[in-house]
C-alpha cells in the first residue's frame, strides 16, 4: 500500500503522483485497480453526489459516510479525506476531534485542510504533533468561495508572495503534501522547487509533483467543467443513451427477451 515515505521518495525521483477523487465504493475500486497513487475523498462530493451548489453545506458526518465506502474499495492507494467547512476552524480541539474521527471511523490515512494563514498552520502543527497526517491546500480554496470566488489566485506579486509564504509555513508545520489550486504555473513551479514535500496541482501547470482532478470532471459526469479540467470520457452522454435504450426496449416489450 502507498505510504507517505513513498510519496516523498517519488518527488525526489521525479515520478509524478496521480491523484483523483472518489465518493463511493464502486468508483474507489475502479480508481485503485487502475493504479491511482492517492485517492481523495474530497468535499467536492457536495456538488458531485449530494447536489449542493458549493462545498460549504457538506457536514463531517457526510464526509465520514462517504469515506468509509471509499476506503472499503481501496487496497493499494493512499486515502485522504477532506475536513469540511467549519469542522476544524473553531478551535484546535475541534480540529483534533474531527480529524481523529476521520482516522478512527473511516480507515483513511490522512486528512486535508484548506488555507495557509497562521491559524491553519498552527492547526496543522497541532494535528501532526499528535500523529495525524495532514495534506495542505493553498491557492483557490473552495471553502472560501464567498470571499475569493472561483478566480485564479496569486496573479499579483503580493498575492504570489503570500501564497509562497503560506506554502512554506505549512511545510514547516508538518504537512506531507500540498495541493496548489488554480494559481499561475510559474508560481506553482517556484513553490514546487522550494518545498521538499510533494506538490499536487489542479489548474496550476505541469511542473507540480503530481496532478489531481475531480473524477466526475475527468469522466464527463459533471454538469459544468472547470476551465482547467480535461474530459477523458463522456459518461454523461453514454449513461443517458444507455438509459434511453433500456427505456425504449421496456416500452416496446423488447426487454426482457420473449420466448
Image: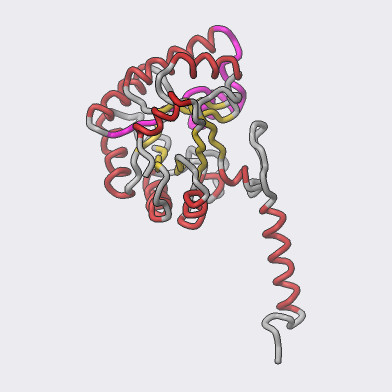
Q: Image check: 41 left or right of 257?
A: left
Instruction: In the displayed orientation, state which residue is furthest to the bottom.
Output: 259
For the C terminus, which image quadrant?
A: bottom right
Picture layout, residue 91 above or below residue 26: above
Picture layout, residue 89 above or below residue 98: above
Q: What residue is drawn where x is 30% and y is 43%?
A: 103
Instruction: In the displayed orientation, state which residue is furthest to the top.
Output: 157
For the N terminus, which image quadrant?
A: top left
Quadrant location of residue 8? top left
Instruction: In the displayed orientation, state which residue is furthest to the front.
Output: 13
Task: Report if residue 144 is visible in the image.
Answer: no
Residue 2, position in %: x, y? 38, 41
Q: What residue is drawn where x is 40% and y is 32%?
A: 7
Nearer the observer, 193 or 250 = 193
Residue 164, position in %: x, y? 47, 14
The magenta span reads 132-157
Q: What residue is drawn where x is 52% and y is 14%?
A: 190
Nearer the observer, 125 or 211 = 211
Residue 28 colored magenta?
Answer: no
Quadrant location of residue 194? top left
Q: What residue is drawn where x is 32% and y is 20%?
A: 173
Residue 53, position in %: x, y? 57, 42
Nearer the observer, 124 or 117 = 124
Picture layout, residue 176 above or below residue 78: above
Identify the image's colour scheme: rainbow, by chain, secondary structure or one colour.
secondary structure
Residue 171, position in %: x, y? 37, 20
Amino acid at each position: 500500500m502507498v505510504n507517505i515515505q513513498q510519496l516523498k521518495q517519488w518527488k525526489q525521483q521525479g515520478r509524478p503522483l496521480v491523484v483523483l477523487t472518489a465518493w463511493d465504493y464502486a468508483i474507489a475500486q475502479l480508481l485503485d485497480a487502475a493504479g491511482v497513487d492517492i485517492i481523495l475523498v474530497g468535499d467536492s462530493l457536495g456538488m458531485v453526489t449530494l447536489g449542493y451548489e458549493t462545498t460549504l453545506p457538506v457536514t463531517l458526518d457526510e464526509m465520514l459516510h462517504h469515506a468509509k465506502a471509499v476506503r472499503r474499495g481501496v487496497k493499494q492507494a493512499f486515502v485522504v479525506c477532506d475536513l469540511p467547512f467549519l469542522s476544524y476552524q473553531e478551535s484546535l480541539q475541534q480540529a483534533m476531534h474531527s480529524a481523529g474521527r476521520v482516522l478512527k471511523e473511516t480507515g483513511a490515512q490522512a486528512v486535508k485542510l484548506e488555507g495557509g494563514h497562521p491559524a491553519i498552520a498552527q492547526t496543522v502543527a497541532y494535528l501532526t504533533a499528535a500523529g495525524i497526517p495532514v495534506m495542505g491546500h493553498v491557492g483557490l480554496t473552495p471553502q472560501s468561495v464567498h470571499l475569493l470566488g472561483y478566480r485564479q489566485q496569486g496573479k499579483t506579486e503580493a498575492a504570489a508572495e503570500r501564497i509562497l509564504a503560506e506554502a512554506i509555513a505549512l511545510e514547516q508545520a508538518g504537512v506531507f503534501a500540498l495541493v496548489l489550486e488554480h494559481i499561475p504555473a510559474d508560481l506553482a513551479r517556484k513553490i514546487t522547487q522550494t518545498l521538499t514535500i510533494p506538490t499536487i496541482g489542479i489548474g496550476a501547470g505541469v511542473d507540480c509533483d503530481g496532478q489531481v482532478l475531480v473524477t466526475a470532471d475527468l469522466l464527463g459526469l459533471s454538469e459544468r467543467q472547470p476551465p482547467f479540467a480535461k474530459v477523458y470520457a463522456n459518461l454523461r452522454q453514454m449513461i443517458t443513451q444507455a438509459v434511453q435504450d433500456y427505456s425504449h426496449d421496456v416500452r416496446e416489450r423488447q426487454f426482457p427477451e420473449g420466448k
